[in-house]
Amino acid sequence: MPSHDPIRFNQTTLEGRELDYIRQAIEQGHTSSSGPFSHKVEELLVTAHDAADVLLTTSCTDALEMSALLLDVEPGDKVIVPSYTFVSTALPYARQGAEIVFADIEPDTLALDPTSVAGLLDPAVRAVITVHYAGIGGDVDGLISVMPDDVELVEDNAHGLFGRIGAKTLGTFGRFSALSFHETKNFVCGEGGALVLRDEGDVDRAHILYDKGTNRRQFFLGRVDKYSWQDTGSSFGMSDVSAAYLLAQLEQKEIVLAKRRAVFDAYVEHFSEVAPRLGLTLPSVPDDRSPAYHMFYLLCPSRSVRDTLLAGLAERGITGTFHYVPLHSAPGGRKFSSRQYDCPVTDDISGRLIRLPFHNALTTEDQERVAEAVVTILEGLT
Ligand SMILES: *Cc1c(COP(=O)(O)O)cnc(C)c1O
């Protein structure tokens, strides 16, 4: 086997003025939260979502924690989440004492299945949290049509910034949506997130929770003559140094999306023809969806083929990865739910899905090497 440089699964890249901006943030002297770079990023994200407000947080997990506090989720409440997701989709609500209810996903978009959700609704359900897996919009209309009016929709939009369903941007359907700027996401600043507020009525309280339970913002806006402790909260704010890094990334939005789209399309090109013969399924993008191109995955015919493929790629210096381990059967999932759940699509997909190397700087040559390796390994099995 010829020796090659390793092909990494993910790699962060400088896309523009990151280093200049970080330097400026430090020199300006306002390096804590709510500084000049933070305001620019917030403005950009408010515009992108036509939002009432956006608050930059230290992570997507934190942004979802804020949503749990804003909804006053408490013991006795239930929150429905997909089983096929990252822990952070469920944890913030579990931490507030809610009972977690696990719904299954649709076999095509791998997002929350409205039929599964409909079967789990009862009067204790306060919220449904949806994830646009891989940056491909889920069936939000279907979800809304089964949800009673007093149940809130929250979008864990860690994968989907700038994706769309029809003309509507992902993250604008729910009362709250949460973004991630973790180093593994499309736009990065190390660790970071944002809470997007759709409703004007949530803005004042969100800022109080954000500022350690104080009405500090109202003081700075001149609405009160001193600020004091008002409510629950925490220290959720992103450093302006991180916001400087993030602004530079978001300024290159079109370029980053184009690079990621090119990687996605090239994989589709490589695999479309051979997929039926090799028993592979490619990601399904419904006609009315514009993805955010967060990742590229393949569904293998079985778990053993997937595991063989992962091992074969590793031998060739290529890092592929599996993805979510179902939450409904994980120790934490059982701890925060009151009964066992059946999520057959989640179990099936989790066992068969492999993610291929995907990042802004992945070269055409490296992608060819990945595709050839996948085909060689799978052909060797037959
Ligand atoms: C990455 C991710 C998160 C967590 O994001 P952090 O910013 O690391 O807290 C939450 N949900 C999903 C679906 C994710 O992929």
Image (cartoon, rainbow, N blue to C red):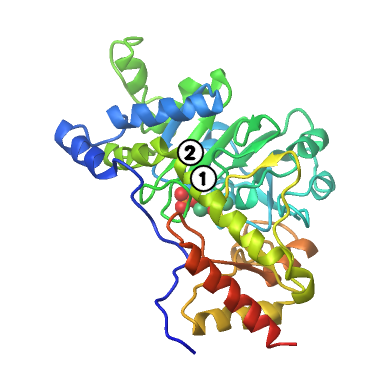
- SS class, disc 1: helix
How many discs appear?
Answer: 2
Q: Name the foreground residue: 329 vs 176.
A: 176
Residue 343: x and y, percent? 77, 61
Residue occupying image coordinates x 46% and y 38%: 253
Residue occupying image coordinates x 54% and y 24%: 51
Work out how far the residue at label 1 is from the one at label 2, CA to CA, in angstroms: 6 Å
Q: Around disc 2, counting alpha carbons within 10 Å, would you say few (fewer than 14), some (14 to 19), or many (20 or more)? A: few
Q: Quadrant of the C terminus?
A: bottom right
Residue 271: x and y, percent? 68, 66
- SS class, disc 2: helix
* In this picture, residue 128 sits left or right of residue 358: right
Q: Around disc 1, counting alpha carbons within 10 Å, would you say few (fewer than 14), some (14 to 19), or many (20 or more)? A: some
Residue 377: x and y, percent? 63, 83
Residue 374 location, quadrant: bottom right
**Residue 38 appearing in the image:** yes
Residue 55 location, quadrant: top left
**What's the residue type where badge 2 is placed?**
Glu
Residue 98 in the image: above or below residue 355? above
* In this picture, residue 224 sits left or right of residue 19: right
Q: Find out if the beta carbon at label 1 lies less than 8 Å from the nearest ligand 1 atom.
A: no
Residue occupying image coordinates x 51% and y 45%: 258
* In this picture, residue 248 sits left or right of residue 104: left
Q: Name the foreground residue: 371 vs 23.
A: 371
Q: Find out if the beta carbon at label 2 lies less than 8 Å from the nearest ligand 1 atom.
A: no
Residue 316 in the image: above or below residue 264? below
| Disc 2: which residue | 254
**Residue 88 appearing in the image:** no
| Disc 1: which residue | 258
Q: Tell whether label 2 touches label 1 (CB within 8 Å).
A: yes
**What's the residue type where badge 1 is placed?**
Ala
